[in-house]
Amino acid sequence: MPISANGYLNHLRSYLDLNCYGKTCLSKEIKAEDAEHIVLSEKIEGTNTRRKVSLAYNGDAFAVRLDQGKDRLFHFLKTDGHPWGKRCDFVVFQAHRSSLKAFAIEFKEASTYIPVDKVYLQLKAAEAWVKSLNQIINAYVGETRAINLSKYVFTACQNPSPDLDENDCNLSRYPSIRHYLFDEVDGQNLSFLENSSITSIR
């Protein structure tokens, strides 16, 4: 019988060396009346302040600060100068109602335009990381589970429209990536993050 979504999430939590990934992304979990929250936090370059986004969730969830990994990718691939060495800021895993989801999230502070090509490469590498993680766990312990992955970029862009589709939602050049302003997404529930492009990773 296939492992449940919650069971697989517990496997991920047990197997991942979270200390290598920023101790759950410098995030904290806070309890609320109807849901729990994960607070994603990143230092704003050139300042002493941090950008924080709080995301509520139902079920069970944890986050990985992916770009804080200090060792080689899975201990055997060099990362310097290779495309797979690019990493997005966060991957949030959530198990809810028998579904296992992964949210690949990149923070960009750029106020004038979105660096879409850089964002694409970072989120593409995150997708490859989740695929590889899933396959390695299957190879070593014989457990596997479909993971539904979606990609997001959160920005402080004052006029993101030139880089977005006609609905001002997704990147026009890379429509699998959903854009949100930081103020739009802060406090939202993961279930309300919209993205019509979902990759099923097995």
Image (cartoon, helix red, strand yellow):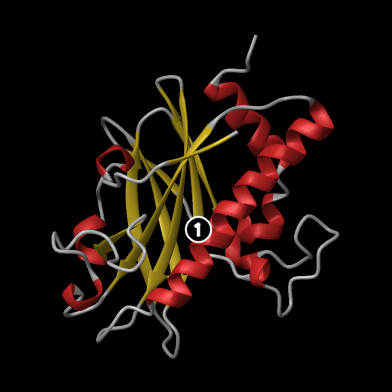
169 sits left or right of 98 in the view:
left
Choose top left, top right, bottom left or bottom right for residue 70: bottom right
Where 156 sits versus 47, above or below? above
Q: Amino acid at mark 1?
A: Phe
Choose top left, top right, bottom left or bottom right for residue 160: bottom left
The secondary structure type at the circle numbered 1 is strand
Residue at mark 1: 90
Q: Nearer the viewer, residue 82 or 44?
A: 82
At a point 54% along the width and 23% down the height, the residue shown is 6
120 sits left or right of 157 in the view:
right
Q: Residue 136: x percent and y percent?
A: 76, 40
Where 121 sits versus 98, above or below? below
Quadrant where the C terminus sits is top right
Q: Residue 143: x percent and y percent?
A: 72, 25
Q: Is residue 116 visible?
A: yes
| Number of other residues with Cα within 10 Å of mark 1, as a class: few under 14, some 14 to 19, many 20 or more | many
Q: Nearer the viewer, residue 172 or 51?
A: 172
Q: Residue 161: x percent and y percent?
A: 17, 73
Q: Is residue 89 visible?
A: no
Q: Residue 3: x percent and y percent?
A: 62, 18
Quadrant where the N terminus sits is top right
At a point 60% along the width and 22% down the height, the residue shown is 7
Instruction: Name, please, the residue furthest toward the bottom.
Output: 46
At a point 31% along the width and 33% down the height, the residue shown is 35
Q: Nearer the viewer, residue 114 or 187?
A: 114
Where 132 sits versus 146, above or below? below
